[in-house]
Amino acid sequence: MNYMLASLLLISAACGNQQKEYQKSNPSLLLGFTFGMTEKQFNRHLEKLLEDGKIYVNDFDLYTYDMAFDKGKAETSFTPYFYNSKLNQLLLALSGSGNL
């Protein structure tokens, strides 16, 4: 029986020194985005991912990535949040069917 899986995952960085430490130990998030990148850097990287066909815009006008799992895939849309013009959160919304 298929069912719809919908969940939210919030990836967030801490402020100040904690964010710098996090960036050192985890330089890349999903698809090569990094905490601390400027909006201009984020948008440039986003355009490159679109050009390369790694992401697409879904029916709801959201940037989307098909995330693969062992037992299927999930459509993953994401929304960036910036603080002081730098990426500090990346909200992911996953939806799929079956047993992921």
Image: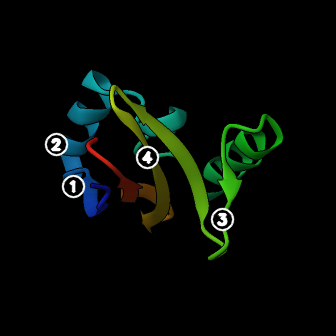
Image location (x, y in percent) of residue 69: 36, 31
Where does label 1 land, which residue?
Answer: 15
User: Considering the numbered disc 2 on the image, is that residue within a helix, a strand or a loop?
Assistant: helix
Camera-side residue of 28 and 4: 4
The residue located at (47%, 62%) in the rendering is 80
Estimate the spatial distance between the alpha carbons at disc 4 and disc 3, rounded to whole Å: 26 Å
Estimate the spatial distance between the alpha carbons at disc 3 and disc 1, rounded to whole Å: 32 Å
* Within-10-Å neighbours for mark 4: few <14, some 14–19, many 20+: many
Image location (x, y in percent) of residue 42: 61, 50
Residue 58, numbered circle: 3
Estimate the spatial distance between the alpha carbons at disc 2 and disc 3, rounded to whole Å: 34 Å
Where does label 2 land, which residue?
Answer: 18
On the picture, is 96 further left or further right than 51?
left
Q: Are marks 2 and 1 in contact (CB under 8 Å)?
A: yes
User: Considering the numbered disc 4 on the image, is that residue within a helix, a strand or a loop?
Assistant: loop
Q: Which of marks 2 and 3 is in front?
A: 3
Where does label 4 land, which residue?
Answer: 36
Image location (x, y in percent) of residue 56: 70, 53
